[in-house]
Image (cartoon, grey):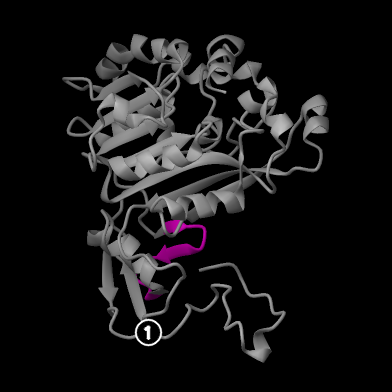
Amino acid sequence: MQEMVQKYYGETLTGTHDLQTNACCADASLPNFVKPLMARVHDEVLTRYYGCGLVLPELLDGLTILDLGCGAGRDVYVLSQLVGEKGQVIGVDMTEEQLAVARQHKKYHQKTFGHKHSNVLFFHGYIERLDELELADASVDVIVSNCVINLAPDKAAVLREAFRVLKPGGELYFSDVYSDRRIPVALMHDPVLYGECLSGALYWNDFLHLSRKHGFSDPRLVTNRPIEIGNLELADKTGNIRFYSATYRLFKLNDLELACEDHGQSVVYRGTIPHHRHAFRLDKHHFIEVGKQFPVCGNTWRMLYDTRFKEHFDFYGNFDQHFGIFPGCGIGIPFADETVGEQTSECC
């Protein structure tokens, strides 16, 4: 699998124009503050972009960021501007041809960004084997990845290594491709389907179970979009399988519960996160407006209180009381007659 991917991204693809589907092309418009950052990235780096989302979580100044499957370095160089000279961005990729482009323009970006010293590093290696790159336990604040984990043969190892190198309270914030069912083995050996980020996609429910198994107890969906396969030949091969591009954030936090439990807590957003003056969106189900008392479950409380977001919120309540499942979490009492057969909304 790895040799197949290396050949596809090192030899077959020379630019985004060579892609045969839109799986690795984000269609979401860039936030206004990102556009000038992107404009400073070298054109050759931009043309080698094969991502499927925007992996720019909030509050990155001064942090150490790890980009899994950095390719030619587009996201690394955008993140370089956001972490500033006191921060660092580390890119890891297994394709030498891609890394050569990233390294070639290292000095260009340092000069363009006005940095006295480069704050980026690029390593040739495998995202399943970060230990071989001597990345220490609890050494990274945030991990990002853009449409790459689906290409890894051992996805469990990727999540396990990500959890190891993250600091407590850190997060894995990444975009990837998912399917609505498990992919047949025969399709997984198709070099084009695999290289186009389709046949290596995880079935969404398998991903959730895998994340929880390796320490990320409460995966949070941030954004998602359906993928349309414009290539008729490839669409015919995949049949009725549906694919989605989705961005998740996975926090490394102790004591997260398996469900959204209600402890009577709430938060108020102060409006102090840069570029989020009026509201902060933690995930798809948590749009928190400035100054408004916002009820939260215990897990959401910890995601805000035990992370870099703490100083931007006021917190109310504690864990002394428990009121059952948080309303709207889709989990009813299984032995209550009135809940049988009922469908409730997706988790808060």
Identify which residue is drawn at 45% across, 83% down.
324
As drawn, 177 above or below 336? above
Query: Residue at coordinates 40% horizontally, 54% vertically from top-left?
Result: 216
Q: Residue at x 68, y 25 (%)?
A: 189
Q: Position of residue 172 (x, y in %)?
A: 39, 45
Give the x, y percent position of residue 306. Answer: 26, 61
Residue 21, horizontal then vertical, whole percent: 69, 28
User: What secondary structure is marked by label 1?
Assistant: loop
Taking the spot 61% from the left edge, 31% from the top edge, the residue there is: 197
Q: Nearer the viewer, residue 167 or 247?
A: 167
Q: Nearer the viewer, residue 322 or 227?
A: 322
- Magenta stretch? 281-294
Instruction: Give the residue type that dot 1 points to.
Output: His
Q: Is residue 212 visible?
A: yes
Residue 336, image x, y percentages:
62, 89
Judge whether residue 32 can be spotted in this image: no
Name the foreground residue: 267 vs 151.
151
Q: In the visual, does 235 lie left or right of 285?
A: right
Q: Quadrant of residue 345?
A: bottom right
| Residue under pointer 1 | 322
